[in-house]
Image (cartoon, rainbow, N blue to C red):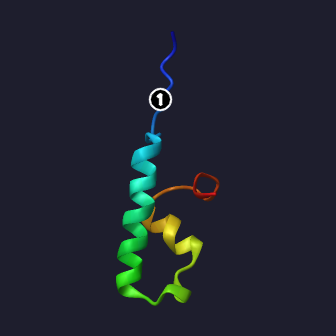
Amino acid sequence: MSDHRAKGRRPTCATTTAIIDAFAALAVERRYGAIRVADLIARAGVGKSTFY
């Protein structure tokens, strides 16, 4: 049986938590309309395809 966890990958719940935490931090710093997806994924440390 192979290990389904590749090096550097996070479980889905950890990725979701990272995105939510990143959004919360950005929402404190900026207004909602000024938060871009690029800023959010950079703060969360995930790729664009992972976000979508």
Check the image and report above or below for 38 versus 29.
above
How packed mark 1 is, by other alpha carbons closer than 10 Å (few <14, some 14-19, many 20 or more), is few
- The quarter of the picture where residue 11 lies is top left
Q: Quadrant of the C terminus?
A: bottom right
Which amino acid type is marked by label 1? Arg
The residue sitting at 51% across, 9% down in the picture is 1
Check the image and report above or below for 11 versus 46.
above
Q: Position of residue 4 (x, y in %)?
A: 51, 24
The residue sitting at 40% across, 68% down in the picture is 22
Check the image and report above or below for 44 versus 16.
below
Q: Is residue 25 left or right of residue 40?
A: left
The residue sitting at 47% across, 40% down in the picture is 9
Q: Position of residue 39 (x, y in %)?
A: 51, 74
Secondary element under disc 1, as helix, strand or loop, is loop
Residue under label 1: 5
Q: Is residue 12 left or right of residue 21?
A: right
